[in-house]
Every structure is written in C-alpha cells, then in structure tokens.
Image (cartoon, rainbow, N blue to C red):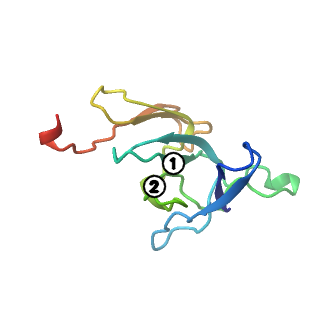
Amino acid sequence: MVSYIFVNLKEGNGKVWESIQLPDPPVRSGDVEGTGSFHSLGIADFNLDGLPDIFAGEQEDPDVYMESDGKVAMKPRGLKERGIIWYNEGGEKPVFNPFIIHIDNPGWHDAVLGDIDNDGDTDIISKIWNADGPVYHLDYWRNEMIKDPGND
C-alpha cells in the first residue's frame, strides 16, 4: 500500500494540489512486508518542534477476512499491526520520516489525539475493531516527550 498526503498550493484559489508520497514504515527482520488497513489518522505536533506530524494506525484485521469471497484480504497474512508517526522534517516541500511507536496487538481503530495527561504534548487513545484474542479493550498511549526544563 502506498500512502500520500496532498498539499494545497497557494496559487489556484484552493484548486491546485500536489501529492507527496510518504515513505513506507520500516519492517523488522522476520516481519511481513506491506501495510494493513490504516483505520486511524490524525495530525498533531508530537515532538513539539512547531511542525504538524502525521499519525496512522493499522487495525486488527483477521488475515483471512474477505478472502473466501475471492477478494483481497485487508492485510497481508501474518502482518502485525503498527502505530506509526511520520515526523515532519519541514522544508518548502515537507519531508516526513516514519517512526513506529508499536508493533502487534493492540490494533488501532478510530484513535483520538489529545493531551490526556495535561503535560503539553499529544497522547493517543485507541480501541480495537476485531480482537485477535479474547479481550476487547481501550488503550492509552502516553507521549513521554522530554521537554527542556529551561522552557517550563
């Protein structure tokens, strides 16, 4: 799967757009390549550098979902779900570098971004859609961004 962002260029009164392909997330040795179904998406300045970063999370889909109908599965067999932040490095044409915050269960479904612990950075709350195991759950991902003590 290929991921893109579309940038609204200043000329053309909002009618001129440019696509920028996001780099694929890295794959660990022994893991299945590819991407699953991203079912969470959000924009926030996760590293507090003043630039908007992109979050996407793959949901827990069964490997064989829809295969019996002759359709393409929602994820490659054996793929472990990931939560990914593409950090914005800036520039006139922004460059984004992917960073995986978690691999495997839990999956990500309808994640919500916000400063849950009131410490000035963006955290993530997510739930799952299809539990790989016996438990459905809600998950809290705390951003432990280390802030410069001189700026408090």
Single out the residue that lies furthest toward the left.
150
Measure the alpha-carbon separation of dots 2 and 1: 8 Å
Q: Which residue is mark 2?
A: 88
Who's the residue at 59% across and 61% down the image? 78
Residue 30: percent from the left, percent from the top? Answer: 49, 72
Q: Is residue 70 toward the left or the right of residue 43 in the image?
A: right
Who's the residue at 62% across and 39% down the image? 130
Question: Disc 1 marks which amino acid?
Answer: Ile
Q: Secondary structure at mark 2?
A: strand
Residue 73: percent from the left, percent from the top? Answer: 74, 56
Residue 137 versus residue 27: which sits nearer the camera? 27
Relative vertical location of residue 127 with respect to residue 53 in this rendering, above or below: above
Question: Disc 2 marks which amino acid?
Answer: Asn
Q: Is residue 148 toward the left or the right of residue 36 in the image?
A: left
Relative vertical location of residue 84 with respect to residue 42 in this rendering, above or below: below
Q: Which mark is residue 118?
A: none
Q: Which residue is mark 1?
A: 54
Could you tell me how many numbered marks the image carries?
2
- Name the image quarter holding residue 59: top right
Residue 16: percent from the left, percent from the top? Answer: 74, 51
- Decide which of tag 2 and tag 1 comes sooner along the chain: 1
Relative vertical location of residue 87 with respect to residue 131 in this rendering, above or below: below
Residue 93: percent from the left, percent from the top? Answer: 55, 61
Who's the residue at 64% across and 58% down the image? 3
Who's the residue at 63% across and 61% down the image? 20
